[in-house]
Image (spheres, rainbow, N blue to C red):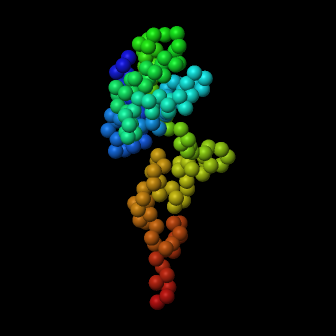
């Protein structure tokens, strides 16, 4: 059970910071871990409680905690959440809450699918010159999709290239 919780710890430690090695967890990600894993319930444990416990277990002048300090923080929170259990049972119950969990990106913008938006953003329905600019899955071809459009004439025009002949 501890190895699953340690995996969750490392996932949250690396979340949001591409330069992080995933070995230390900052306060923001600790609160996120507690929210996403269901440790914060708003009754027994609140975000304020989590902040206080984090400040208690971290070293002075350091902004993050390692795995061993994380275990002591979770043990303290577990005693508050599971009041009738021994500290070791509470710790195992907290690890069970963290099993197979990872950071959830909340507030991420999703594509609209109401009204005519889905019709307008479906490249399989494109016609004319726009049809040639996208592949079958809707990915733009970039310059390759625009190369034949540099003639100056509309794509169906039959008299393309005849202007110079008429002028002479």
- Percent across and percent down for residue 139 are 45, 50
Q: How many labels does the image show?
A: 0
- Quadrant containing the N terminus is top left
Which of the 4 quarters of the picture holds residue 14? top left
What percent of the width, then of the height, locates residue 88?
Answer: 41, 13
Q: Which of 118 and 155 is in front in this view?
A: 118
Residue most extreme to the front: 60
Give the residue drawn at x 39%, y 43%.
17
Q: Nearer the viewer, residue 166 or 118?
A: 118
Residue at (46%, 47%) from the top-left corner? 136
Return the x and y of residue 101 as percentages of the image width and height: 45, 26
Left or right of residue 114, residue 101 in this image:
left
Q: Quick check: can you spot residue 13?
A: no
Residue 66 vertical placement versus 149 (above, below): above
Viewer-side residue, 96 vs 132: 96
Q: Which residue is located at x 62 percent, y 43 percent?
A: 113
Q: Residue 89: where, in percent of width, then height?
A: 44, 11
Q: Is residue 168 visible?
A: yes
Q: Is residue 19 above or below residue 148?
A: above
Specify the farthest residue to the bottom: 168
Residue at 40 percent of width and 60 percent of height: 144
Instruction: Find the residue positioned furthest to the right.
Output: 115
Q: Is residue 145 left or right of residue 118?
A: left
State the image quarter where residue 72 is shown.
top left
């Amino acid at each position: 059970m501890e190895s699953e919780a340690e995996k969750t710890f490392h996932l949250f430690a690396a979340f949001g910071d591409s330069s992080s090695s995933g070995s230390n967890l900052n306060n923001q990600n600790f609160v996120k871990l507690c929210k996403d894993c269901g440790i914060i319930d708003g009754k027994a444990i609140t975000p304020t409680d989590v902040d206080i416990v984090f400040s208690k277990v971290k070293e002075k002048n350091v902004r993050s905690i390692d795995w061993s300090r994380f275990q002591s923080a979770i043990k303290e929170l577990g005693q508050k959440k599971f009041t009738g259990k021994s500290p070791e049972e509470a710790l195992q119950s907290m690890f069970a809450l963290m099993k197979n969990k990872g950071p959830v990106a909340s507030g991420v913008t999703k594509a609209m699918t109401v009204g005519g938006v889905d019709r307008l953003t479906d490249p399989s329905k494109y016609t004319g010159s726009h049809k040639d600019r996208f592949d079958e899955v809707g990915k733009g071809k970039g310059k390759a999709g625009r190369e034949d459009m540099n003639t100056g004439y509309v794509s169906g025009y039959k008299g393309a290239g005849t202007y110079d002949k008429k002028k002479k």
